[in-house]
Amino acid sequence: MNSNEFLLDSGFWGFLYKILTPVEWLQTWIMKIVHDFFVMLGVSPIGVSWVLAIIILVLVVQACIFPLFYKQMKSMRKMQALAPKMQRIQNKYKGKTDQASNEAMSRETMK
């Protein structure tokens, strides 16, 4: 086992390598299929078809990430709607460090 193989099999980098290798294969597969499709349509196999393949890959990745983005935006809007209420509760218990106040504040924020 050479030093590069050891580095890829150990620790954080090994973990990252194991996760990203299938992603790399998938990305390569998508780009190759799209490239071959455009070449089949008669587009130049040297430049334009690769540019179009990259653009399609970007659109595919964005489409895959969109549900996560949408969920994050919904969550952010809910937090913005709750912010004034949370601010009032924090101001109500400002400066109070006893355990009873902390528990009361926790109960109010969990409602």
Image: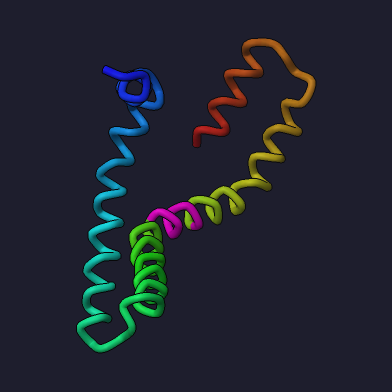
Q: Position of residue 61 (x, y in %)?
A: 37, 61
Q: Is residue 70 magenta?
A: yes
Residue farthest to the right, as pictured: 95
Residue at the spot x=26%, y=72% of the render?
34
| Part of the protein shown in magenta | 68-73
Residue farthest to the bottom, as pictured: 42
Residue at the spot x=59%, y=47% of the render?
82
Please, is residue 69 above or below residue 52 in the view? above
- Report the magenta stretch's main SS: helix
Colour scheme: rainbow
Q: Position of residue 60 (x, y in %)?
A: 34, 66
Q: Position of residue 66 (x, y in %)?
A: 40, 61
Please, is residue 71 above or below residue 59 in the view? above
Count of marks placed on residues: 0
Please, is residue 51 above or below residue 99 in the view? below
Q: Position of residue 97 (x, y in %)?
A: 72, 14
Please state which of residues 48 and 63 is positioned toward the viewer in this rendering: 48
- Quadrant of the rendered image containing residue 101: top right
- Asked whether, in this view, residue 64 is left or right of residue 78, the answer is left
Please, is residue 85 above or below residue 102 in the view? below
Residue at the spot x=28%, y=33% of the render?
18
Residue at the spot x=29%, y=41% of the render?
21
Please state which of residues 90 and 36 is positioned toward the viewer in this rendering: 36
Residue farthest to the top, as pictured: 98
Which quadrant is home to the N terminus? Answer: top left
Q: Is residue 51 magenta?
A: no
- Asked whether, in this view, residue 72 is left or right of residue 35, the answer is right
